[in-house]
Image: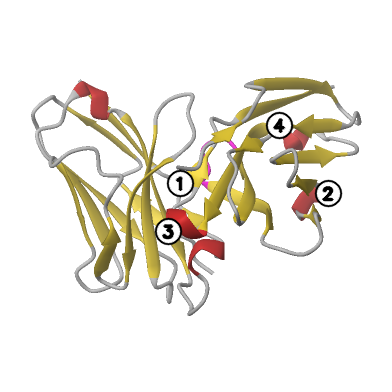
Amino acid sequence: GAGVSQSPRYKVTKRGQDVALRCDPISGHVSLYWYRQALGQGPEFLTYFNYEAQQDKSGLPNDRFSAERPEGSISTLTIQRTEQRDSAMYRCASSLGTSGGGVKETQYFGPGTRLLVL
Amino acid sequence: AQSVTQLDSQVPVFEEAPVELRCNYSSSVSVYLFWYVQYPNQGLQLLLKYLSGSTLVKGINGFEAEFNKSQTSFHLRKPSVHISDTAEYFCAVSDYWSGNKLVFGAGTILRVKS
């Protein structure tokens, strides 16, 4: 079956521009996660949704970052007024989200969007 | 807050040799541990996970890991590596207090040489 897909795969933008990164989770997966991975580092948690509800946004670095999942499926991570320090790989993951799962569940990752801010 | 340390940034090894990739985590009452692999230009793929029970966990592609609570470690092992195992490996931890987020280590690049 289809895995998690992300678009675009690569995005080059100029400092100050807004960007929108899209994630399409595995069909039927309730939980959706966003991570950011800087070069030479592991992924770092940004935010998490159950259905359309944003359950945890503690990892968003500042108010330029926002995420939504309006219909409980596709999610968009938006970065406003991009800065060079925002350059990174942005990864999306999804999991079943069954009752009692949560922290123990396997998260399935997409290929990522590599963002370069010039 | 949880943290994960992967002690080796790169591990070179010859084909058919054994390998161990080290992972240590900060202490917690109850932790769940994961190893993910990332092949070039692909997403992270789960190798194995420890939730409870037996401390020796077997995963895909012949990998296994051992949970050691006293050492707060979860080292990944393979008795005989192949060229195709060349990839970056990430250890991750979650616990009840962290919510649903995974906390990752910085990764270890495994380079298998012929």
First-in-chain label (3 vs 2): 2
Q: Amino acid at mark 2?
A: Gly
Circle 1 sits in a helix, a strand or a loop, which is it? loop
Q: Position of residue B85 (x, y in %)?
A: 74, 36
Q: Are marks 3 and 2 in contact (CB under 8 Å)?
A: no
Q: Which secondary structure dominates the residues rendered in magenta?
A: loop
On screen, residue A52 versus residue B45, left or right, reads: left
Q: Which residues are magenta?
A: B39-43
Distance from label 3 to label 1 (Cα)? 24 Å
Q: Mark 3 — residue?
A: B99
Identify the subunit bearing mark 3.
B
Marks 3, 1 in one chain: no
Q: Which mark is residue A1?
A: none
On screen, residue A113 versus residue B75, left or right, reads: left
- Reply above or below: B5 against B44: above
Q: Position of residue B36 (x, y in %)?
A: 61, 46
* Closer to the camera in the image, A70 or B95: B95
Residue drawn at x 81%, y 61% is B54
Circle 3 sits in a helix, a strand or a loop, which is it? loop
Q: Amino acid at mark 4?
A: Thr
Q: Position of residue A25 (x, y in %)?
A: 39, 64
Circle 4 sits in a helix, a strand or a loop, which is it? loop
Identify the subunit bearing mark 2.
B
Identify the subunit bearing mark 1.
A
Distance from label 1 to label 2 (Cα)? 24 Å
Q: Is residue A48 visible?
A: yes
Q: Mark 1 — residue?
A: A111
- Reply above or below: A4 against B5: below
Q: Please tell me whether mark 4 or mark 3 is closer to you in this view.
A: 3
Q: Amino acid at mark 3?
A: Gly
Q: Please tell me whether mark 3 or mark 2 is closer to you in this view.
A: 3
Q: Please tell me whether mark 4 or mark 2 is closer to you in this view.
A: 2
